[in-house]
Amino acid sequence: MDISSRIIELAAPAAEAAGLVVEGVEVMAAGKRSRVLVTVDLPETEVGSADLDKVAEASRSIGAALDEANVPSTPYLLEISTPGTDRALTERRHFLRARTRLVELRLADGALTGRLADVDGDELVLDVDGEERRVPLAEVSEGRIVVELKRLGE
């Protein structure tokens, strides 16, 4: 088992205890130490953003789990982060987390911008200028959240 897989194995229960899931792990050299970046997020069933208290709780628990297992076995710097709005939406679970957000999709025949209302099976359900538009996930090469200064319902 590689080091990233082992860290995921140790970090996942700690993140789940804080109400989060491990989205990914990166381990890279940083001078005489390693830099361990663990990306956490809310479960795909939830809408919104992970709050700082949950991220801090996950950070403490993940750090304790890694230290107890002595993984990595060399000095390391642990960073806990969330994916942020600039991550590419490439998987169904990414789109599930982006529900209610304005998204821009890159399709084979151009781009499409709309508010992601739902993910229904393998289709994205968008509100495009008041009209429902369904886009099969297989037709989306990439999606991005459009940063809004004023969110829906504010």
Image: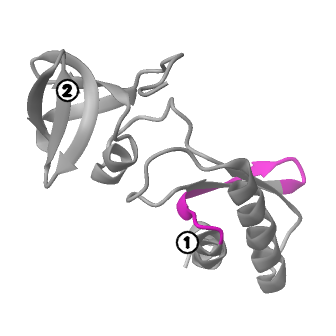
Q: Amino acid at mark 2?
A: Asp
| Position of residue 124 in the picture relative to residue 103 (left or right) | left
**Label 1: element kind:** helix
Identify the secondary structure beneath mark 2. Answer: strand
Mark on residue 18? none
Task: Give the residue drawn at x 13%, y 42%.
Answer: 138
Is residue 61 shown in magenta?
A: no
- Which of marks 2 and 1 precedes in the sequence? 1
Please report the bounds of the magenta region as a residue range.
Answer: 18-33
Q: Position of residue 92 (x, y in %)?
A: 28, 51
Residue 71 in the figure: left or right of residue 8: right
Are there few (<14), some (14-19), or many (20+) residues within 10 Å of tag 1? few
Q: Residues within 10 Å of mark 2 (few under 14, many from 20)?
A: some
Q: Are marks 1 and 2 in contact (CB under 8 Å)?
A: no
Q: Closer to the camera: disc 1 or disc 2?
A: 2
Measured from the top left, where is residue 17 in percent x and y?
63, 75
Q: How is the image coloured?
A: one colour
Q: Which mark is residue 127?
A: 2
At label 1, which amino acid type do we have? Ser
Q: Position of residue 99 (x, y in %)?
A: 34, 41
Q: Marks 1 and 2, how far apart in space?
A: 38 Å
Q: Is residue 24 magenta?
A: yes
Q: Is residue 114 above or below residue 44?
A: above
Q: Is residue 110 toward the left or the right of residue 19 in the image?
A: left
How far from the left and from the top, in percent, is residue 32?
90, 54
- Residue of label 1: 5
Depth check, front residue: 50 or 84: 50
